Amino acid sequence: MQPSQQKAWRAGRFWWDWSSGEAEPTPPQPLKTLSAVLFDLDALADVEGAGHRPAFNAAFASLGLDIEWSVARYRQLQALTDERRRVAAELRKRGVSTECDVLAELLVDEICMTKAMILDETILDADIAARPGMVDLITEAYGAGVAVGIVSTGSHTWVEPLVRQLIGTGIAGAVVTTDDAPRGELYAAALAELGAPAHDSLAFAGSQVSQRTATAAGLATVLVDDGSAPLRVVDCQRAHDVWWQTHPRPTAA
């Protein structure tokens, strides 16, 4: 593979992105069959925008704060990976606090705790739908004997029923949240529950943080966003194979 092509692959382009005028990369030695596909819940559906954002707005209102996050504003704040930092940044922007303000820290705590309670109570009734093509992909994978796992930093009490709402009952062989394993071990825990080797599996991440976690667990990964095209299992197979061509495993000394 040429250096320019390698750079493009690292930027997230896969075989279906290459125009007819470009030389296609040399196909890697294919894996016969994927063992598992793992999905970050935010890759499966826009849980942040359709679930967390409205819950935060309800928390602001319940605490008498004149703050309402629009879709555009929330997307800006998502550059901050921790929700406490998002709230703190909003308060500073509005002149409510400084970075060293103890009272503001207490307010951030109260906002996040209120939001968490509201989210637990409302998320199963929120307008959350799977991203286009995801249910078809998961159904196809399940029918082909490829294990399906879901990971999330949310509470298991609402994540598991939400997964059932999105993809149906009995499809996901593992649903792992931070109630079950540390954030950095979610993918590894899901693989262990599925009995699937990391090298023979593919992860769909909904954020760069999740992608780094999946990569650290030894998984080939696809970063999903609103513009991602629907995939088939054969596409997953090829994405997996290309990943390992451009991200070779370390060899023993």
Image (cartoon, rainbow, N blue to C red):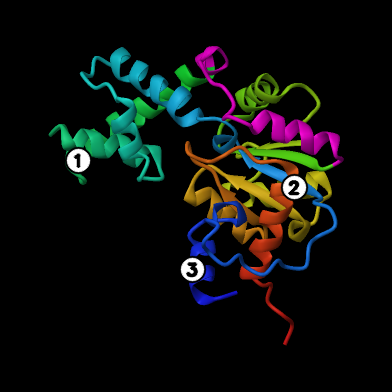
Quarter of the picture holding the C terminus: bottom right
Judge depth for marks 1 and 3 and give the one in front. 3
Identify the disc placed on residue 101: 1
* Amino acid type indicated by mark 1: Asp
Instruction: Residue 157: give x, y in percent of width and height.
Output: 63, 24
Q: Is residue 235 left or right of residue 144?
A: left
Q: Which is nearer the N-term, disc 2 or disc 3? A: 3
Q: Is residue 140 left or right of residue 236?
A: right
Neighbor class of circle 3 (other Cα within 10 Å; few <14, some 14-19, many 20+) is few
Say if 91 sits above or below 19 in the image: above
Q: Which residues are magenta?
A: 121-145
3D distance between C-alphas at marks 1 and 2: 53 Å
Q: Secondary structure at mark 1?
A: loop
Instruction: Residue 19: give x, y in percent of width and height.
Output: 52, 56
Instruction: Residue 249: give x, y in percent of width and height.
Output: 69, 72
* Amino acid type indicated by mark 2: Val
Q: Is residue 230 left or right of residue 4?
A: right
* Amino acid type indicated by mark 3: Lys
At x 43%, y 28%, the residue is 49
Instruction: Residue 83: give x, y in percent of width and height.
Output: 39, 37
Q: Is residue 45 left or right of residue 249?
A: left
Q: Is residue 173 visible?
A: no
Write down the residue under mark 2.
234
At x 79%, y 56%, the residue is 197
Judge depth for marks 1 and 2 and give the one in front. 2
Q: Which is nearer the N-term, disc 1 or disc 2? A: 1
Q: Is residue 139 visible?
A: yes
Write down the residue under mark 3.
7
